[in-house]
Image (cartoon, rainbow, N blue to C red):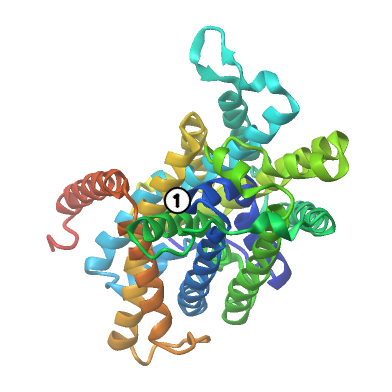
Amino acid sequence: MTSQLKRQIGLGNAISLNMINMIGVGPFITLPLVVAAMGGPQAMLGWILGALIAVCDGLVWAELGAAMPEAGGSYAFLREIYGRDGAGRWVSFLYIWQLGFSAPLSIASGCIGLAQYAAYLWPVLNTSVPVLPHLRWSSVAAAATCLFVLALLYRNISTVARLAWVLWAGVLFTIGSIILAGLTHFHASQIAMPQSAFHLGPAFFQGLGAATLIATYDYWGYYTVCFLGGETRDPGRTIPRAVLLSIAIVAALYLAMNISVLGVIPWQELVKQGDGRYAVVAALMQRTFGPTAARIFAALVMWTAFASVFSLLLAYSRAPYAAALDGNYFRSFARLHTRHGFPNISLLALGIVAAVFCFFDLSRVIAALVAIRILLQYVLQQTGVIFLRLRRPDMQRPFRLWLYPLPPLFALAGFLFILFSRKQAAREFIYAAIIALTGSILYFARAYRRKEWPFL
């Protein structure tokens, strides 16, 4: 079976899809969480460390994506790194299995963030559903958003790419306006550090780990184009450029936005609101330009959240399709829409699971997502890019990561720091272990029945 996807995505589309995935709603809902994690403006260290990890990890994605421009991204990378007919079948199957959980978690986080800003505009969304007192209307709105995006993506890729440009323009306008509002009403005295800000004890490193985890979540998305490698024009040049340019632009925007917000809203207030239910952008606009501007920008943040969910669901739906096409996942996921030629079964499955995850708490969704993704994907890619260099030195690589092997080693160290530095890390380790165990059992039972590795 061969892929019928067409290469229609250029550099501009690739950057726009990456950036709307990266920015989304993340920084607009997690800024109080980051400040609360470290207890003051020193939380900017989390954003800086997160950016450094993103650059190092992005170089890995750039090399692998340029060398293997196929639908599915990491699925194709892991399969080739660890052996197409050997352990690579198990590792790549396990990746797709965990993606069935981590991708919907990522999509759901955007929908939850959108619903939080919707609740700023319509406070009734913060009330409970009458027949289900433990359920808020905001959760229902989040799930409905997910299903609406699913319906929008049910069309051909050229139409989707044009829509991405419109969404991207709204994202850039929103974050640019926020930066401008903050800088024009900036008060440097509000960024005064607490006395214990840089006391290098256990609490400092635990806080830095928690802040970097959230910042890492906000940076993720620079690799979106790698999942669309089978639909990207001139992938050897387009993929590395899109990955690295996206990181550089978004890192600059994030740092500028955080500084501008901290110059208007006292960090002590952000610490108190660190539960993630604070519409920080609306609060910023209300203090600078009044309640009407606050309502307008709450709507614009909803736009960016919508754009992020759109990009996430589009990109991730290609990975189960690629695995099924390769005979290494459930056969039904290899189906394409008869008219528009997109992987409709994969798209439907991820979208419906994401709608279910919209009923979970945001902070737990983010922590579970990051831990699962690091353990069952990123660690395997950081070590894998080095292993592939050693095992297949003559492989064609249109782009070679700079300063090899330092970037993958630094990214690996950063990810492990995020995992082990936090107090509640054990809970996320359990989630990842359960997913790895169930996926392995499923793979080996399937491989035994089909006489595949390791039962050849």
Q: Residue at x 13, y 63 (%)?
A: 456
**Image check: 209 left or right of 399?**
left
Q: Return the residue at label 1.
A: 334
Q: Amino acid at mark 1?
A: Ala
| Nearer-the-camera pick, 229 or 58 | 58
Q: Residue at x 24, y 48 (%)?
A: 433
For the N terminus, the image quarter is bottom left
* Label 1 SS: helix
**Image check: 373 left or right of 312?**
left
Outermost residue, bottom side:
394
**Image check: 254 left or right of 322?**
right
Q: Percent from the top left, x then y, of residue 436?
A: 25, 50
Whether 325 is drawn above or below 148: the answer is below
Q: Residue at x 63, y 58 (%)?
A: 192
Q: How many marks?
A: 1
- The answer to whether residue 158 is seen in the rendering is no
Q: Percent from the top left, x then y, of residue 387?
A: 29, 80
Q: Percent from the top left, x then y, of residue 69?
A: 51, 72
